[in-house]
Image (cartoon, helix red, strand yellow):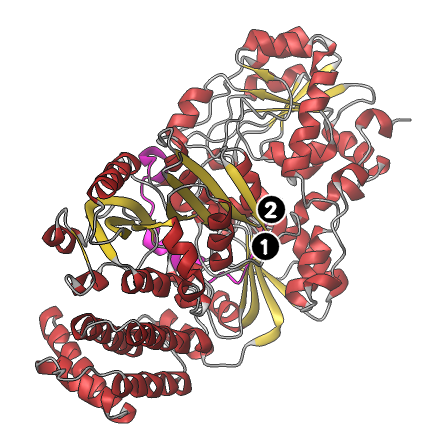
Amino acid sequence: MTQLSVIVYGRDVQGLLGACLDSVASQLPPDTELLTAAVGEGAQSVAARHGGTVVPLPQDASDSAARAAGAERAAGTWLWFVHSKDRVPTGAPRALLDRLAEVRDAAGGAGEVDVVVADHVRSTWRSTGGAGIDAGRLARVGRRDLTLADAPQLLRVAPLLGNRVVRAAFWHAHHSELADAEEASAEMFAARAALVLADRIACLEQAIVDVRVLRTESLPPVTAGQRYGLVGAYEDLQRIMRRVATPVRPRAVLYDLMATESMRIVARQAMPDAVAREFFHRASAAAVRWRPEGYRRPAGLEGIRRRLLEEDAYTKYRAFQSANHKRRDLRKAVRSGKKKFGVKVRDLHYQRVLREPVDPGLAVFSAYWDRGVACNPGATAAKLAELAPHIHPVWVVSKAAEPLLPPGTDHVVPGTRRYWEVLARAKYLVNNVNFPNAVVKRPGAVHLQTHHGTPLKKMGLDQRDYPTASKGLDFDALLSRVDKWDYSVSANGHSTRMWEHAYPSRYVSLDHGYPRNDVYYSAGAADIRAVRDRLGIAPGRRAILYAPTHRDYEASWTPRLDLAALSERLGDDTVLLVRGHYFYGGSASPLATLRRSGHVIDVSAYDPVEELALASDALITDYSSIMFDYANLDRPVISYADDWDTYAKTRGVYFDLMAEPPGHVARSEGELTELLTTDAWRDDVSAKARAHFRRRFCEFDDGHAAERVVRRVFLGEPEEALPPVVPVESRTPAPTPEEATR
């Protein structure tokens, strides 16, 4: 008999479902089962790779619906609901099953235990597994099983479904009541209603779930209806208590919880005044309606707040709150000393311009920390000039990069007076990295984050566990910058999920493709011949682009290949286009001695890199994101991965490239030479791996990405009006160099 059904439910929130399922599946004993009530195709794909029973649900299914669907398919005597973003600590399933066995053995005339309540821990983006907060309350109950009247303080245990298991028969008997609340309050309601409806309750002091607390800034804003729904959920709980004749002590505890949470929301949550006033009014009515007989308000400031709530005195409450804030601010000012007098002239000027109206016809672009017109911002700006010429672009460019700008490019240099003026006034700010911390996100301004690659290596918050990669990173400042994003451009579903995980905030993901990759579908034979002419590559000569990535554990760039030996072995018919990572732009080139041979061309300073890709017959890279872009051309890619294990452990990666490469993998120079001196570099094995790679990582790149981005962001067109993404198998990439000579 199946004792326990673990029901993991929900969407793949910020890419956390995989970790959740790993934590469950790795430690389930034989008398348990795993079901995943997977909401949306992304969650279903992840769940299918982890085993167990997958219950597929549409993208718009609620968490409540997912729990119900999972419970309907479950065969266990007990049900344990674990949200898809959370994890199960090591040893938790075994401890839970042991406790359930004790409960079963102790069952007698007093009635069956319907709910087992346990402790939990909490993790955030900056901390993991914070100490359990309910252990004390649970310890006071011990191993007894009792009624809610015996231990009303159990209502104060965090109202989660992950920190309790329910008897399946009990869940099905009361499911309609447990699912009554609005979705935003459904888990709180169900968790507490289960205690109210249970005949008997048992406790477990051990934490059985690690709750992942998502950044508020990464979640949709709370609506007015959801605020009001919280009060309604508490009132529904009170009605259930009245119907089942719950004694006064549990009702008093629930009343305290309702009043305290209501006051905390009014005090700490940002709401429009009209919403806050209405919420206060509804909370006041509930406080009066459900005040238990004989109830006495707390003493002190909390008692004053409760009195104002019961009197529905919203204006007086705000005045009382303001007076308290002023007293705290005064004490803080005394402790911290006098503030520094005055501000820099730059800041004064910037603040003044920020008070001027936003200019709807002004857009500011930057790429690669102000290196010039490039990448996704560059391709977006070009399409903007075509589709929305009324919007004027201004580029942020460093002093050193000014001479390299295309003639006539309107630009500003960082730190200048006009630089701060355009940043303050522009409606649109576009970057493939981030603007400085000092840039203010104005109401009405739109920040478009285009990114500059598909992530193989860990990014953003995911770098925290890799000190070599995250040295010097200020994650709080990073999140402050991320919170300014309105849109995040993505080339594939993998990127969308990883960005949500690495940069949790409230932006909208634009699954439109990378604008810089449009050229891989629009370039013609003449374009390819022209690039090769500029590079000095004769017709019919094989050109191989070698583009390795940066390594955090290397201070300067040293090619990992003996380029002289490789070029000699490949002969006169092959030229190597060698591009060092831009992080090493100031380093002395190790290629100087090879340039005279004509077999090696140093293209480290050549822009744009897309032209190098078009000019080449194949790509050699290690772990650079160029592989994802180059795959659009449907040309051979070789992964030279001599230090994969070191790189993966030091930098952190999102998937095993060795298991899912874009083509052949060479782990040594000998293997690489063998591939390139035979036809293996472009054989059927390479083509098959590349086809799989393209389907996964070129998902939205079809030549129309820039158009979709411009129409959506700058012209305000709805998603359904944008050009649909062309399926990978229906696309025609730019011709190969060989085809371009015909």
Name the secondary structure under disc 1. Answer: loop
* Residue at the front extreme, as displayed: 109
Residue 297 in the image, given as x and y percentages of width and height = 13, 82
Q: Is residue 686 magenta?
A: no
As drawn, is 246 to the left or to the right of 535?
left
What's under tag 2, amino acid-wise?
A: Glu
| Crowd around label 2: few <14 · some 14–19 · many ≥20 (10 Å) | some
Residue 139 in the image, given as x and y percentages of width and height = 12, 50
Name the N-terminal-most of marks 1 and 2.
2
Can residue 337 be seen?
yes
User: Residue at position x 13%, y 69% from top?
Assistant: 336
Identify the residue under disc 2. Answer: 41
Residue 711 in the image, given as x and y percentages of width and height = 70, 63
User: Residue at position x 26%, y 78% from top?
Assistant: 263
Q: Is residue 304 above or below residue 192?
A: below
As drawn, is 46 to the left or to the right of 552?
right
As drawn, is 714 to the left or to the right of 504?
right
User: Residue at position x 53%, y 13% from top?
Assistant: 667
| Crowd around label 1: few <14 · some 14–19 · many ≥20 (10 Å) | some
Q: Is residue 704 above or below residue 602?
A: below
Is there CB contact under 8 Å for labels 1 and 2? yes
Q: Nearer the viewer, residue 98 or 161?
A: 98
**The magenta segment:** 465-492
